[in-house]
Image (cartoon, rainbow, N blue to C red):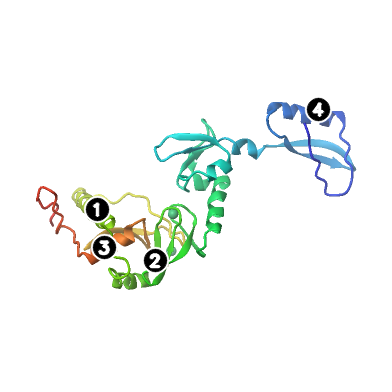
Amino acid sequence: MSFVVHRFFPTTIRLDRTIVNRILAYAQQAPELEVCGLIGAGEGVARRVYPVRNAAAEADHLFAMDPQQQWQGPFTPGELSALSWLSPLTWVTMGEKQPVDRAWKQPLINAIFVAKLSEQPQAVSNFTCPTCSQSLVTESYEGTQVFQCRFCAGTLVEDGKIARIIARTGRDRPCSERIQALARTVVQENQARHTLQMLKGGRNTVPLFPCPKCKNPMSRSFYSAAHMINVDRCSFCELTWFDRDELEMLQCLIENRIMPGVGLVNEGGAVELSS
Ligand SMILES: [Zn+2]
Ligand SMILES: [Zn+2]
């Protein structure tokens, strides 16, 4: 066993037998770990021992749920940060009977994401991702500036800039086949869900995201009745949040004039959900 005596004054502290025995007893509780603690001293004589939990004991026992919903581990924070699939939304726990939480909620693991953000070239903004709780970075998009999350690929746009993005739609970035197929599916699903909700007379119970700036709950709605893509808005800060692909889907709907209830023809030729 070894221990370091940190001193505030250049003085020697004498440890008597009782204090040493207490440290040894504490060390025996977890022989594989370094013992942490404080020694209270007065006039150069140690009087009390204050054991401190060794944070490294927990750091070596991190488990994370992989994309196939299987628990992996145990990992050290270093091993965890090397995992390609680790994101702020990954479920993590420190052991079998320990609470399970999102990775960003564990300060030890959140430090990994903060470090990754500081390594990338884009400027980090003061806005926070409503799902990952990480800083958004500034990004150039359709000739204007937007803010993106490096982890979930969501985009924050100042309301005044949306019109400019839409005006340029189809010029800089033609709508890809993937986005076009996704947009059709999402609009169809959103319309079906919306119709069902209207029939039931129920309200949307999806939890609301906090605004990336003021942190108050944003309101969720379709971009417009003709463009049924979900967006989250803070009317106070005049900001709109688009989840991954949603901004491109909106552009694609406008570019290809895809309207709800029109052109949603399935492979059998039947028109679904026409209003
Ligand atoms: Zn995010
Ligand atoms: Zn706000």
Q: Amino acid at mark 3?
A: Cys
Q: Does any portion of residue 225 appear in the rendered image?
A: no
Q: Which residue is mark 4?
A: 21
Q: Which residue is mark 2?
A: 157
Q: Does any portion of residue 72 appear in the rendered image?
A: yes
Q: Which residue is mark 3?
A: 252
* Mark 2 in CB contact with mark 3 (< 8 angstroms): no
* Mark 1 in CB contact with mark 4 (< 8 angstroms): no
Left or right of 74? Residue 215 is left
| Element type at mark 3 | helix
Q: Amino acid at mark 4?
A: Asn
Label 1 to label 2: alpha-carbon separation: 22 Å
Q: Tell me what residue is drawn at x 40 percent, y 37 percent.
A: 69
User: Picture quarter containing residue 79?
Assistant: top right
Q: Amino acid at mark 1?
A: Asn
Left or right of 267? Residue 243 is right
Q: Which residue is mark 1?
A: 190
Left or right of 37? Residue 177 is left
Q: Amino acid at mark 2?
A: Val
Within 10 Å of disc 1 (Cα), the crowding (few <14, some 14-19, many 20+) is: some
Label 2 to label 4: alpha-carbon separation: 63 Å
